[in-house]
Image (cartoon, helix red, strand yellow):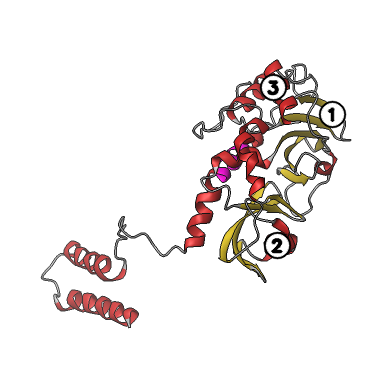
Amino acid sequence: MQRVNKAACLLLALGVLLATGCKHETKEYWKDTRRYYREYLNTPAKLDLEDKGEVEPAEARLAEGFAGIDIQLRALERALENSDRKPDAAWAKQMFQRFPWISGLAAVDSTGNVMAQQPDAPMKPLDFTPLLQEDAKQNMRALRGYVQETPLGSEVYVGVPIYVGSDFRGLVIAHFDMRALLPYSSRPADLMIAAPGQVVWPGRFDAQATPIASTDWDKLVTEHAYGSVSNGNGEFYWVSRYLGNLPLVFAVPEAGSFPEKPEQLAILKQATALGSANAPNEPVTEIQPAYPELDESEGSILTKPAPQASDDQKVKEEAIR
């Protein structure tokens, strides 16, 4: 009905033009036509600042839970994407200052040999080799990610491939414990974080009693970007976000009742110590590379060791062990 009314108004406007004959100049005809067009056919949009929209409670809780974490991950991606200009020691120092939640940085060659890394004695056994595998579904220069399970908790990796022309030279990699990002969430106890095949952060829940642990995320995230999953205990609402080619799933309970393990929340008191610094609440700013374009004769994180860990950092690692 609305389309019919708009069409009628347009015909009326044209009729007015024809009926006036030559009494008006062409300029006046055009002004009338524009007025009718804007009033009935192409009405200017109006922003209602009072309208809160229709947001379900679970959606609101999920947004509160993962938005701050997502902002940090997106900023890390941008910083790594700028690192293909052979990042040097100044760049490494800036990365640790800007992202105090990362555990370390590393550079590996095309066969997986570690050329440089900081800290030089990481607290977890690290495996960079899965990042060497090129993903056929993405650009060869795109970021790559994966999650490694270790006795000290899951470690998330994201790396940027380094090429000289079409020659693959290796990767520059940042790695971190997802729990170090929990201070950026306003609802870390309600939030669960998963990757294909594993739960990275269970929140207050017994992960195995939730549908988050039993869902085939590798399959589901290729079909949907968000939705609900359920089991006999209830339902979780989830959304997926990619870190490179790694899908990360963030979820909160939507309905039902799930067994809890409140002792898992003890890590929140020392979450900041899982990163490289203890000041997690810096405002998000764009990284500006602190190095010029380097030629083959100049130093690089790929050919020269990154700066060594400070004594404070080593003490912090010992405390987490």
| Secondary structure of the residue carrying numbered label 1 | strand
* Quarter of image, res 152: top right
Residue 234 in which image quadrant: bottom right
Q: Main secondary structure of the magenta part?
A: helix
Task: Indicate left or right for 266 with 139 as reference.
Answer: left
The residue singled out by tag 1 in the image is 114
Q: Which residue is mark 3?
A: 313
Residue 46 spot, x, y in % from top left: 30, 59
Q: Residue at x 79, y 53 (%)?
A: 136
**Quick check: 28 above or below 300?**
below
Specify the amino acid type for callout 3: Gln
Chain-order first, disc 1 or disc 3: 1
**Quadrant in which residue 32 is drawn:** bottom left
**Which part of the image, by quadrant, shows the C terminus?**
top right
Q: Amino acid at mark 1?
A: Val
Instruction: Looking at the picture, tell me which residue is in the foreground, 5 or 173.
Output: 173
Q: Nearer the viewer, mark 1 or mark 3?
A: 3
Q: Give neighbour class at mark 3: few <14, some 14-19, many 20+ (Cα, 10 Å).
A: some
Left or right position of 70 against 195 = left
- CB contact under 8 Å: marks 1 and 3: no
The part of the chain drawn in magenta is 69-78
